[in-house]
Image (tube, grey):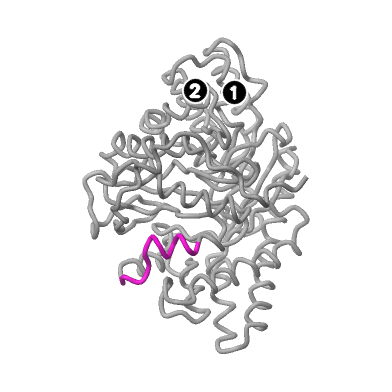
Amino acid sequence: MVEKENLDVRTITMGINLLECASPDLKTTCDNIYNKITTLAKDLVKTGEDIAKEFGVPIVNKRISITPIALVGGACCKTSDDYVEIAKTLDKAAHTVGVNFIGGYSAIVSKGMTRSDELLIRSIPKALSCTELICSSVNVGSTKTGINMDAVRLMGEIVKETAELTKDQDSIGCAKLVVLCNAPDDNPFMAGAFHGVTEDDAIINVGVSGPGVVKYALESVRGESFEVLCETIKKTAFKITRVGQLVAQEASKRLGVPFGIIDLSLAPTPAIGDSVADILEEIGLERAGAPGTTAALALLNDQVKKGGVMASSYVGGLSGAFIPVSEDQGMIDAVEAGCLTIEKLEAMTCVCSVGLDMIAIPGDTKATTISGIIADESAIGMVNQKTTAVRIIPVIGKSVGDQVEFGGLLGYAPVMPVNTFDCSAFVNRQGRIPAPIHSFKN
């Protein structure tokens, strides 16, 4: 599975509670944050490398998630620039301990925004343009609270501003910014990772991946019934998750930090043979996006979860199948063939793990259009009681048909068309969309 089918542990993510670092003084807060991260995570990268070497399983990323910074900086940050100073401190700490990313430059505003939340959100473009390893997320809705449309409107503007400030790098800042509905507290995957306030002081969460392994297993059951197909996916997901469980327990023991959860998401990479789209095609579709795609993805997602929960008592995070366009060669091919559109991707998000992920769109797309897309995804999450997200990249200076190169795990993406009919009168209404009727379960 490792040598031929691209099995890997995608990330070991250490979650760190920073609430005790809060102080009325900005410099003291920054010093406290830096000291706590560099103390707790000082051995994280080496431990991951040692486990990978001993067990023979690649561990691709070592990451940190932290308490949403809007909660930590509330007492000391009087301006957006104050929050940028915290972002620089986080970036420095991440470089010091050697992790790939640090997530949690975040705000949870699903019902309303405090002044601290708004200051952090308005600081995001500058923070992402002057740091390397920071990932940012904003949760704008939930099944319990509805959708904060004031935050949705603001995030459309923030995405555009982030794109503009990082336009010399094909607007890559937007690849480190995600807008969520029903964000989980224990997600190890970037850019949406943060350390929820219900968590321990520090935890180890592990995200596994293995689209190539699933595809390889399905090659042996071509033409078989749905029952055989589902059993094969479940058994394969079980094996993949057991690898993650083994790594998580070992990392927890060596670092002296409690084990949190296994996220058993099938997370693709640009590597050939490591694609969720390829699995869908192996199930029986000519291309991802063809009629039947949403049903095939629903089947895949459900069987992955069923196999995974038998392999670990602590499955959490997102867990299922990711469909990021730029990170999945099969998805890119489907877009370029004209088979996969944003509208079809939106339908697929009803049944997959996350949402509209790593999608490049024309740089002249209006902020209100982006807000409308965020609102649509949030509605899907809110009504279906699931996590949904938007990580969309309006690439300044690029138009439909152009290609954008992000590099590494972020891959490359064709710029996709968006519906240009106006939604600004809807987006500019103030207030929030109420929670759905089935949210009342007391």
Residue at x 45% of width, y 20% of height:
85
Q: Is residue 326 on the magenta stretch?
A: no
What x and y, as percent, mark residue 224? Answer: 60, 88
The residue indicated by pointer 1 is 72
The secondary structure type at the circle numbered 2 is: helix
What x and y, as percent, mark residue 3? Answer: 54, 68
Residue at x 37% of width, y 46% of height:
370
What x and y, as percent, mark residue 434? Answer: 58, 42
391 horizontally vs 49: left or right? left
Check disc 2 and give the amino acid type.
Ile
**Mark number, residue 368:** none
Distance from disc 1 to disc 2, alpha carbons, whole Å, reads 10 Å
Magenta stretch: give its range. 337-348
Quadrant into which the N terminus falls = bottom right
Q: What is the crowding at mark 2: few (fewer than 14 residues within 10 Å), some, or many (at least 20)? A: many
**Which of the pair 170/359 is nearer the observer?**
359
- In the image, is residue 421 above or below residue 7? above
33 horizontally vs 291: left or right? right
Residue at x 64% of width, y 37% of height:
15
Q: Earlier in the sequence, mark 1 or mark 2?
A: 1
What x and y, as percent, mark residue 221? Answer: 59, 85
The residue indicated by pointer 2 is 86
